[in-house]
Image: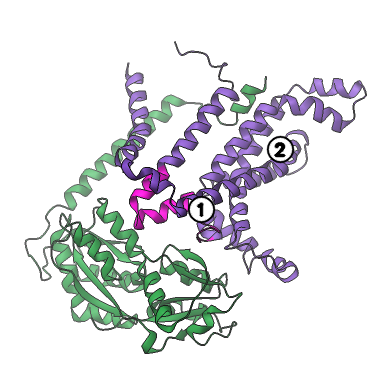
């Protein structure tokens, strides 16, 4: 009985801020606020950057998860902790750290600019970098867990039947971890889509170049609160759709059955 | 078979939920207790309604423009020396951000803005106890990297291609002042970023990530060795005025009034002068 009551309080705790937002949104002008050039520009940039960040997370995260799951090497725990650090790091700190590495006077930023003329801070590429930095751990964690949970004997069987390691990975392992790949990619995307702290610190805030939706919301809060509310609800709607879709399709929605 | 393994990344099992919850409840009880005590502390502390009295006590929370950070930090210490029973805490940020927080119900005693526009927002929301008073003025200066490696001598140099110029959004006082100054000089710049507040500009320039920005004279002073200032001629410069006021529903009105008169007084003004602020 008490448990149900406390669960109810917890649900209200999560739901109330959302309903509060819905209640304050100026619905009569919602559509025009949402389709204002600045809103659309921020939306376009957010979609563009978060998809790039997700692609990078998948391309580099899959081998990383594979290595972490399959190879025992000295210092693996430290390597894993390092790769997952940005999960628990305050994003602003992440942004500062990115400066130290890729900033103009950073470890790698200096040679990058001298040799290639590449300057990451205040650029769209900087946004992608910041989003990948915070989003990739979600992908790695999910895929690594799936790889660990896999019955390796199926792979071994494929190998004994003459399959090359790459063939076995492509035809046996990959299909088996497909749900985890999807789930990880969606989680990484959602995190990248909502990224704020590292972006505003490292990539700055310029319309069309680095001002993603969360930054636009933050800025509009001062100049145009109605727009901030509409954009917030819009972002929540997207996140909500993703979570619901994710749960039903890939997180074993059938597995947990009905609550009694 | 992989469905469950992919969730295991998220779901952890708490080894001793009972103990954990007990501790959590104990913490919550403690927090509520402290809150109750703090609540008592901020009640009507003094009976005086203006000048510094010995009777004032409790907490005084101030929302102040980011450019006041150095001066007000020292001001708070000096004020606490004069009124040992008062504890001052200051929330520094862009005046626009602070005004928004106050309008949204932040429990603040005094609001000190770097411009009139954001103070007007709070006035319009009918949240001020009395008419704002100007307590300081400021002027603009170009901030460049230490030693001026980009060789910037004037506002016109800020338009150079390849130069990383950072500023703030027009809602933030410094963003609007800088735009006014550039407009006056007929210079069109191409900002790399709109920082959240003036200290953001200072940080980006003094860390070497940006080449230049327009900030307050006091910010260049405060940056000290880490950055260099380039003067803006009077005809293009802007005189920034700083108003402050006590808010209606201020949790500690007596201390607020004491703070206002402390800043207007000799000691408060001397601190502001020391940080480069001009006469009100």
Residue B262 drawn at (x, y percent): 19, 73
Q: Give me the chain that's green.
A: B
Query: Residue sitting at 69 percent across and 25 percent down?
Result: A149
Residue A91 drawn at (x, y percent): 52, 51
Looking at this view, is A126 or B225 the one in front? A126
State yes or no: residue A214 in magenta: yes
Identify the element where label 2 is drawn.
helix
- The number of callouts visible is 2
Query: Quadrant location of residue B21?
Result: top left
Query: Residue sitting at 24 percent across and 67 percent down?
Result: B80
Reading the image, the residue beneath label 1 is A41
Q: Residues within 10 Å of mark 2 (few under 14, many from 20)?
A: many
Front disc: 2 or 1:
1
Numbered range of the magenta stretch: A204-232
* Chain A colour in the picture: purple
- Magenta span: chief secondary structure: helix
Q: Residues within 10 Å of mark 1 (few under 14, many from 20)?
A: some
Reading the image, the residue beneath label 2 is A65
Query: Quadrant location of residue B30?
Result: top left
């Amino acid at each position: 009985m008490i448990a149900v009551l406390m669960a109810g309080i917890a649900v209200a705790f999560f739901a109330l801020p959302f309903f509060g937002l819905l209640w304050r949104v100026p619905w009569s002008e919602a559509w025009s606020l949402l389709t204002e050039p600045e809103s659309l520009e921020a939306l376009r940039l957010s979609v563009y950057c978060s998809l790039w960040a997700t692609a990078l997370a998948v391309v580099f995260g899959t081998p990383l998860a594979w290595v972490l799951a399959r190879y025992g090497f000295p210092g693996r725990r430290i390597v894993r902790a390092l790769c997952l650090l940005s999960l628990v790091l305050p994003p602003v700190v992440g942004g500062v750290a990115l400066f130290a590495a890729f900033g103009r006077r950073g470890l790698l930023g200096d040679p990058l600019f001298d040799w290639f003329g590449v300057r990451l801070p205040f650029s769209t590429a900087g946004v992608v970098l910041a989003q990948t930095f915070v989003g990739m751990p979600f992908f790695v964690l999910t895929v690594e867990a799936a790889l660990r949970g896999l019955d390796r004997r199926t792979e071994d069987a494929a190998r004994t039947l003459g399959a090359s390691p790459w063939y076995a990975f492509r035809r046996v392992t990959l299909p088996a971890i497909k749900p985890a790949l999807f789930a990880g990619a969606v989680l990484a995307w959602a995190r990248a889509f909502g990224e704020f702290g590292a972006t505003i610190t490292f990539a700055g805030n310029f319309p069309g170049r680095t001002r993603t939706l969360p930054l636009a919301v933050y800025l509009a809060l001062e100049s145009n609160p109605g727009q901030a509310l509409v954009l917030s609800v819009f972002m929540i709607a997207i996140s909500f759709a993703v979570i619901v879709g994710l749960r039903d399709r890939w997180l074993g929605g059938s597995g947990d059955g009905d609550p009694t | 078979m992989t469905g469950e393994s992919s969730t295991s990344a998220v779901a952890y099992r708490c080894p001793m939920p009972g103990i954990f919850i007990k501790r959590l409840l104990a913490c919550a009880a403690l927090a509520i207790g402290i809150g109750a005590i703090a609540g008592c502390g901020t009640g009507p502390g003094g009976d005086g309604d203006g000048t510094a009295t010995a009777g004032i006590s409790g907490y005084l929370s101030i929302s102040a423009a980011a450019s006041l950070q150095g001066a007000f930090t020292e001001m708070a210490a000096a004020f606490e020396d004069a009124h040992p029973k008062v504890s001052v805490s200051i929330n520094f940020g862009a005046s626009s951000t602070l005004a928004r927080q106050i309008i949204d119900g932040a429990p603040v005693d005094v609001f000190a803005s770097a411009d009139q526009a954001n103070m007007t927002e709070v006035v319009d929301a009918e949240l001020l106890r009395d008419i704002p008073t100007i307590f300081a003025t400021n002027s603009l200066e170009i901030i460049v990297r230490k030693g001026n490696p980009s060789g910037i001598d004037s506002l016109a140099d800020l338009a150079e291609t390849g130069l990383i110029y950072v500023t703030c959004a027009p809602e933030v006082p410094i963003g609007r002042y800088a735009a006014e100054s550039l407009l006056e000089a007929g210079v069109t710049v191409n900002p790399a970023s709109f920082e959240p507040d003036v200290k953001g500009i200072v940080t980006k320039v003094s860390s070497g990530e940006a080449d230049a920005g327009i900030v307050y004279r006091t910010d260049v002073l405060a940056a000290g060795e880490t950055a260099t200032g380039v003067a803006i001629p009077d005809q293009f410069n802007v005189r920034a005025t700083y108003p402050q006021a006590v808010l209606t529903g201020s949790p500690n009105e007596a201390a607020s009034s004491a703070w206002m008169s402390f800043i207007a007084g000799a000691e408060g003004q001397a601190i502001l002068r020391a940080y480069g602020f001009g006469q009100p």
